Amino acid sequence: MPEKQTLERAREDAREGKSPSTQAGEFVREEIEHVREGKHGVKNTKQAIAIGLSKARRAGVKLPPPKKGKASSRTRAQAKRDYRKGQSSRRRKPSARRSRAVEGALKRMPHKAASKKSLSRHAKSVARSRGRASRQASARKAASTRRHERKAA
């Protein structure tokens, strides 16, 4: 269950008209924090991000499942289930036994995946899989954001 602050920040992003991926970013950030503070561990950075996205979809963020070819069929199927669950109004109480089992499994995993070094390595590897034009566009946008922030300060 996501924390109240996370839900509120995501709702605020939605009210401001920000994209679903930005709203989902709040949940991913929360998950990274959980790993850092020792609440549980994750196998790798990708898993922490996946948990965050799953929580976002279940919380009602309109983040559609990945397109065919972008993720494995299992990942896509799970994302579809999470999305449907988040968009439906009927809420069922989660299974305590299952929740405990998942928490126990995550507790046994390492916490290194949420370190700055791991996140940086993951970001770089993901960027490499994107095209040159896409990377340049991101860099341009980041530079322009930095300029705006410096002027405001």
Image: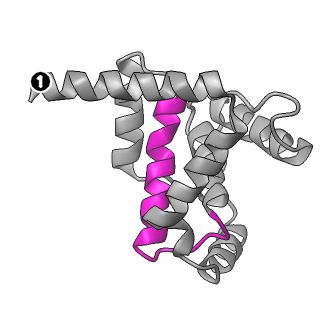
State the residue lying farthest toward the bottom: 108
The x and y percentages for residue 14 are 42, 23
Position of the C terminus, as image quadrant, is top left
Of residues 47 and 1, which is closer to you in this image? Answer: 47
Q: Is residue 129 left or right of residue 75?
A: left
Which residue is at the front of the view, 103 or 131?
Answer: 131
Q: Nearer the viewer, residue 5 or 134?
A: 134
Residue 114 lies, with reference to residue 75, above or below; the image says below
Q: Position of residue 140 (x, y in %)?
A: 43, 22
Name of the residue lying farthest toward the right: 73
The residue pinned by badge 1 equals 152
Give left or right: position of 50 versus 29.
Answer: right
Q: Residue at x 42, y 62 (%)?
A: 33
**Does the magenta segment cover residue 38?**
yes
Which amino acid, mark 1? Ala
Whether residue 91 is visible to the viewer of this picture, yes or no, is no
Report the residue at 35% width, 38% height from top. 8
The region drawn magenta spans 20-44
Vertical arrangement, residue 33 with respect to residue 140, above or below: below
Magenta-drawn stretch, dominant element (helix, strand or loop): helix
Question: Where's residue 70, x and y in %?
Answer: 81, 35
Q: Is residue 73 magenta?
A: no
Residue 117 in view (yes/no): yes
Q: Is residue 53 above or below residue 102?
A: above
Residue 20 x/y as whole percent: 54, 26
In this view, the residue in front, 50 or 152, is 152
Which residue occupies 37% across, 19% down?
15
What is the residue that sits farthest to the top in this orientation? 17
Is residue 110 left or right of 139 when viewed as pictured? Answer: right
Residue at 69%, 78% (x, y): give it. 105
Q: Secondary structure at mark 1?
A: helix
Mark 1 neighbour class, 10 Å CA radius: few under 14, some 14 to 19, many 20 or more: few
